[in-house]
Image (cartoon, grey):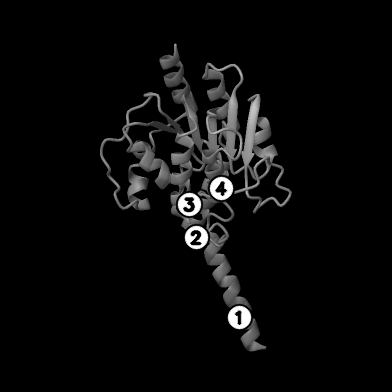
Amino acid sequence: MKRFLGKIRDQRYIGKLYLEDTTYNLVKEMNFIESNKVPQRYEVINFLLETLPSKDKTYLEIGVRFPEDNFLKINAKIKFGVDPGIENKENPVEFKMTSDEFFYALNNGDILSKKIKFDIIFIDGLHLADQVEKDIKNALDFIKEEGFIVVHDCNPPSEYHTREDYTFTKTPASIFWNGTTWKAFYKSRLNNNLSCACIDSDWGIGIISKVKYFDYLKENNNPFFEYSNFQKTRKQSLNLMSFEEFKQKITKLNT
C-alpha cells in the first residue's frame, strides 16, 4: 500500500512539474495563438485566384483529408483533390492515391491530361521535407506561368511542432504538427528561379511563384537545416510577412 501511495504521489508531483513548466506553458500559448490567426489558408488561396487572369480557374489540392476544412471553400470552377485516405476513411476525393502516384499517372497521361496546367496547387500532404520537396518539384511542372504553389505549415512556432512523427503527441505541442515542411520551403527560397514568401498566419502559408515578385535568398545561412538557426533567421529564411504586406506587394506588381 505504501508503495502504491508513493507511486501516486510521484505521478502527481511529475504532473505538477509538467503543468508548471515554463516551456510547456509557452508552447501551449503558441498553439492557441497560431490556431486563432487569420486569414486562414482558403482565404489566401481565394485572394490569389482573384489576381489571376484565367476565366475558368483550375485548382489542385494535395492532401485534402476533410474537404470541409479547405477544399470546399475554394472559389475555382475546376477543382481536383488528391488524398490516400489515411486520416479520413471516407476519403471523398476524385484521386484516392498518394501525391507521388498522382503525379506519376499525370505525367504518363493516365489521368486528366499531361498538358493540364493549374492556376493554383495547394500542398498539404505528408509534412516531411523530402515529400514536400517532391510535391513542390512536381507541382512546378503543372502550374501556369503566372500561377502559384501554396504550401501549408511552413512556419512552425516551436521545435516541438517540427517533430517527424506526427503520432507522437506527448510534447508541449500536443496534437499540433507542422513536421519538417519548413526545410523544403527554405530550399525553394534558395532557388533563383523561384519567388517565395510566407504569410504569418495559419501555421505559415508559403507561396511559391515563377513570377519575380520577391528576391530569392542568395546565401544559405542554414546548410544543415538546424531549427535553432532557423529560429534566429526565421523572417529572412521564410521571407515572412503579414497578409496585408503580401497583398500590397502582389497587387502593386499586378497593376
Q: Which quadrant of the figure has residue 219?
A: top left
- Residue type, label 1: Lys
For the residues labelled 3 and 4, say whether their Cβ atoms are less than 8 Å apart. no
Figure check: 45 above or below 65: above
Q: Looking at this view, is 17 or 119 the one in front?
A: 119
Disc 4 is placed on an element classified as helix
Q: Which residue, as the protein is rendered here, is positioned at the far top? A: 255
Q: Nearer the viewer, mark 4 or mark 2?
A: 4
Disc 1 is placed on an element classified as helix
CA–CA distance in space, label 3 to label 1 = 39 Å
Count of marks overlaid on the render: 4
- Residue type, label 2: Asp
The residue pinned by badge 3 equals 128
Q: Which quadrant of the figure has residue 237?
A: top left
Crowding near pointer 4: few (<14 within 10 Å), some, many (20+)?
A: some
CA–CA distance in space, label 4 to label 2 = 44 Å
Q: Which quadrant of the figure has residue 102?
A: top right
Task: Examine the rendering and report whether any part of residue 239 can be seen.
Answer: yes
CA–CA distance in space, label 3 to label 2 = 29 Å
CA–CA distance in space, label 3 to label 4 = 17 Å
The residue pinned by badge 2 equals 21
Task: Examine the rendering and report whether any part of residue 200 can be seen.
Answer: no
The residue pinned by badge 1 equals 7
Q: x, y percentage for residue 31?
A: 55, 47
